[in-house]
Amino acid sequence: MKRLRLLLVAYWFGVFLILHLAEAQSQEGFISLDCGLPLNEPPYIESETGIQFSSDENFIQSGKTGRIPTNLEPENLKQYATLRYFPDGIRNCYDLRVEEGKNYLIRATFFYGNFDGLNVSPEFDLHIGPNKWTTIDLQIVPAGTVKEIIHIPKSNSLQICLVKTGATTPMISALELRPLASDTYIARSGSLKHYFRMYLTNASVLLRYPKDVYDRSWIPYFQPEWTLISTTANVSNKNHYDPPQAALKQAAAPTNLDAPLMMIWSLENPDDQIYLYMHFSEIQVLKANDTREFDFVLNGETINTGVISPKSLEITTRLTTNPRQCKGGICRMQLIKTQRSTLPPLLNAFEVYSVLQLPQSQTTESEVVAIKNIKSTYRLSRITWQGDPCAPKQFMWDGLNCSITDDISSPPGIISLNLSASGLSGTIVSDFQNLTHLESLDLSNNTLSGMVPEFLASIKSLLVINLSRNNLSGSIPQALRDRERKGLKLYVLGNKYLCLSNTCIDKPKKKFPVTIVAPVVSVATIVVVMILLFVFKKKMSSRNKSEPWIKTKKKRFTYSEVMEMTNNLQRPLGEGGFGIVYHGDLNGSEQVAVKLLSQTSAQGYKEFKAEVELLLRVHHINLVSLVGYCDEQDHFALIYEYMSNGDLHQHLSDRFKLEAISLKFQQLLLVLWGTLIPNIT
Ligand SMILES: *[C@@H]1O[C@H](CO)[C@@H](O)[C@H](O)[C@H]1NC(C)=O
Ligand SMILES: *[C@@H]1O[C@H](CO)[C@@H](O)[C@H](O)[C@H]1NC(C)=O
Ligand SMILES: *[C@@H]1O[C@H](CO)[C@@H](O)[C@H](O)[C@H]1NC(C)=O
Ligand SMILES: *[C@@H]1O[C@H](CO)[C@@H](O)[C@H](O)[C@H]1NC(C)=O
Ligand SMILES: *[C@@H]1O[C@H](CO)[C@@H](O)[C@H](O)[C@H]1NC(C)=O
Ligand SMILES: *[C@@H]1O[C@H](CO)[C@@H](O)[C@H](O)[C@H]1NC(C)=O
Ligand SMILES: *[C@@H]1O[C@H](CO)[C@@H](O)[C@H](O)[C@H]1NC(C)=O
Ligand SMILES: *[C@@H]1O[C@H](CO)[C@@H](O)[C@H](O)[C@H]1NC(C)=O
Ligand SMILES: *[C@@H]1O[C@H](CO)[C@@H](O)[C@H](O)[C@H]1NC(C)=O
């Protein structure tokens, strides 16, 4: 046991590295990143394996490059010479393109080498997607460490994250991905953490790529009570596990014919569940009356894999199909010869993995793709925008909120996105519509241009959209207007070129016959004149905002009166361009509609005033009449007569039927009331 441990520590660093380069094999699907290698340095072939390593810079957005002093550099291992360290942020993640559902061997290497001259070995956590993989403590293993896991990604991108857990700075030397055959190394649940992988030989050669097509590393291991068996013949290693032929050409058997072949090891964590993989091949030439047969016994229990009788010069692999536990964390594996066997058991190669449960589900993939596209389209470089957007909760991207339930096995969805004042420019890209759980979207205070996209209306869960203070143009799509009527809050103030009513340039043409173009123009003229008039007036008298600005005999209400008449805004009737209209009543008798300005921005205030001016001037018997207004500090409201006989649309249609003049006023009302009145046709 002691010897095994010693070997495991020495694994990789120096001692056993006598590799022989065979002819180059396909490295298809290999990802081999030399962390910290500058992007301008070309990829290089690692001399020991022939594997091509390249810079990690295109796979991570953060971190700095470190270089270890030449005198501390491990020989022949170029990828440990540079490293990436992460002084900023808590979680920093690599984002790798993988194939969903495919089995990967993932290997991360950490070699501190006092690169920063501080001589403080870092300690931090390593995460795979939204779950913790392991802790890296380089104080315990100053020579560096290699972590390996066999993992099946649940989407086409894989995040490997370094998470700061204390005062020291996380760092990484190399990151490698190797696709495996898909029907191998399957855990019932979770992923398989490499515990050890060895082949039984008294030599001291570490086997790696290209001897192992999957670039697994096999450490040599032998015990004094064993006898070495070897062959020079070729051994077929093809069974999808495909361990190196070199590993199958040698085997150990107990020297004492009747003794079991036994191995004992202890687990890092006594509760770990493990999987065992054993590779056998009969490499002795058996006499006619010889039989080699044995049972597989783990912790005293015969594992029901059937009697093992390795085939001649051909691989046989046996494994535990269920996860196993070892009492007290001490595992004892035995191969015991059967009664009729004339030869002792043998073993060529042996692998042990422990189960890593990955309970936290990652964010719904389509949303991850969408938010990543949004991130790259608008060139958002926020330190927290790495790894899974929602999970784990403590590393949720800033500006996001997600639905993370207590059932962490259900994928979180993004429910709010706040990119207010984030320097967004260009159009609103269609990726937003893939955030299908979105309830609140704040894109305000940017320089977004182009149209307000109709697809926003397709996000069923949306309750609030703030597009204020951008440079959007065109008109509000009808679909969004329809959503507004059903309760969606859409804020669009402060978009100079955005048309807020239904009477935008192209629309009336479709809805009204040519004959009404003139009235429309005249209404537009009135509006312009009114606004000019108002601006002029405003210039003449630099007024105090708290003073009433409407010269009128109409009643001025206080805000508390407004609240009283609407019973604290209890019954909304609809929402217009600049605010919501509520039902109310005056002195318990006269019914009114109260339009409350939703924003206090300069734009809203201006438009509000224009609306009042218009209503007061263009008074007509048939027009909904203004009862009063409220102008108190930040509160502005208009109080109109309420049409109680049928809905307003109905009422207006009846009244203005077929009259040119009435059409004109319908237009006017549309301007004034925004979407409260649907299409009048
Ligand atoms: C390994 O064992 C074989 C057979 O017992 C022996 O001939 C050989 O010298 C040993 N090699 C080493 C490196 O110990
Ligand atoms: C083993 O196989 C290789 C090719 O795969 C062949 O070149 C070699 O001659 C074979 N060796 C023996 C001993 O059959
Ligand atoms: C097997 O056969 C060989 C001769 O081929 C003989 O020497 C040996 O004793 C036999 N072994 C057994 C167990 O019968
Ligand atoms: C995003 O949504 C569009 C339209 O609903 C759809 O065609 C597209 O496949 C979605 N993209 C992803 C990555 O799910
Ligand atoms: C995120 O949403 C949850 C409800 O899903 C809410 O309880 C929490 O306060 C929100 N967090 C932030 C920062 O808005
Ligand atoms: C978005 O964030 C800004 C600050 O960055 C904050 O003022 C604003 O209220 C947030 N919007 C929402 C909808 O929470
Ligand atoms: C808009 O963003 C700028 C910075 O881009 C900030 O100074 C300003 O306070 C923001 N305004 C609002 C209303 O959030
Ligand atoms: C919308 O965004 C603007 C600009 O950031 C902000 O002033 C306003 O309060 C926001 N409105 C809401 C309802 O969040
Ligand atoms: C705003 O959009 C208009 C066109 O709609 C464009 O002419 C102007 O340059 C834009 N302004 C900014 C600051 O992007």
Image: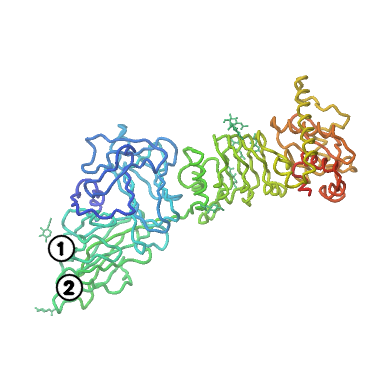
Q: Is residue 19 left or right of residue 414?
A: left
Residue 545 rendering spot, x and y as whole percentages: 75, 25
Look at the image and tell me in which quarter the N terminus lies.
bottom left
Q: Is residue 86 visible?
A: yes
The residue sitting at the front extreme is 514
Label 2 sits on residue: 343
Asked which secondary structure carries label 2, the reply is loop
Report the front residue among 622 and 95. Answer: 622
Query: Which residue is drawn at the image coordinates 29% and 40% (left, top)?
Result: 42
State the mark number for residue 242. Answer: none
Give neighbour class at mark 2: few <14, some 14-19, many 20+ (Cα, 10 Å). some
Q: Amino acid at mark 2?
A: Leu
Asked which secondary structure carries label 1, the reply is strand
Q: In this rendering, is residue 505 above or below 130? A: above
Q: Is residue 326 visible?
A: no
Query: Which residue is drawn at the image coordinates 49% and 44% (left, top)?
Result: 395
Residue 212 rendering spot, x and y as whole percentages: 25, 57
Residue at disc 1, CB closer than 8 Å to ligand 1 = yes
Q: Is residue 52 left or right of residue 376?
A: left
Label 1 sits on residue: 228
Q: CA distance from mark 2 to mark 1?
A: 14 Å
